[in-house]
Image (cartoon, rainbow, N blue to C red):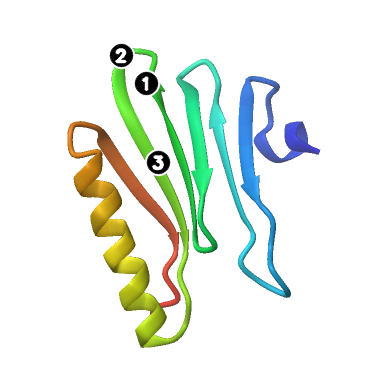
Amino acid sequence: MGKEIWGDTNFEWAYRGAEGRSGGLISIWNSNVFAMYSLWHTMRMLMVKGKWLEDGSDILIINVYAPCTTTEKEQLWDTLKIVTEEYEEYKICVAGDFNSI
């Protein structure tokens, strides 16, 4: 199925399964461009740490599935702040569904 989604065989992926009806996350990347060396997740984030192969840059990609309530969103932003400060020497990409209108 991955080749059908990605359109090529040069990919790797990571996922965090859903809890209930929502919250599942998947990250897919070109394995000729990015090499993962660490993966971890929380209930709301899938974080992939690796190296951009072209220039050797350390990269942290954070895939987010934000909650709908303000209190839970504040907790998510607090966690994101801690993570990004911990990896300030990395190039960081934060993307996903922020449940914001």
Q: Earlier in the sequence, mark 2 or mark 3?
A: 2
Q: Earlier in the sequence, mark 3 or mark 1?
A: 1
Q: Spatial distance from mark 2 to mark 3, Cα to Cα?
A: 15 Å
Residue at image location 71% in from the left, 40% down from the top: 5
Image spot of residue 16 (x, y percent): 63, 52
Report the residue marked by disc 1: 52
| Quadrant of res 91 | top left
| Quadrant of res 43 | bottom right
- The reply to whether residue 101 is visible in this rendering is no
Image spot of residue 7 (x, y percent): 69, 31
Q: Which mark is residue 21?
A: none
Image spot of residue 21 (x, y percent): 72, 75
Tell me whether circle 2 and circle 1 mark residues in contact (CB < 8 Å). yes
Q: Nearer the viewer, residue 22 or 29?
A: 22
Q: Which mark is residue 56?
A: 2
Report the residue marked by disc 3: 61
Image quadrant for the N terminus?
Answer: top right
Residue at image location 61% in from the left, 66% down from the top: 23
Q: Is residue 7 above or below residue 52?
A: below
Q: Spatial distance from mark 2 to mark 1, Cα to Cα?
A: 5 Å
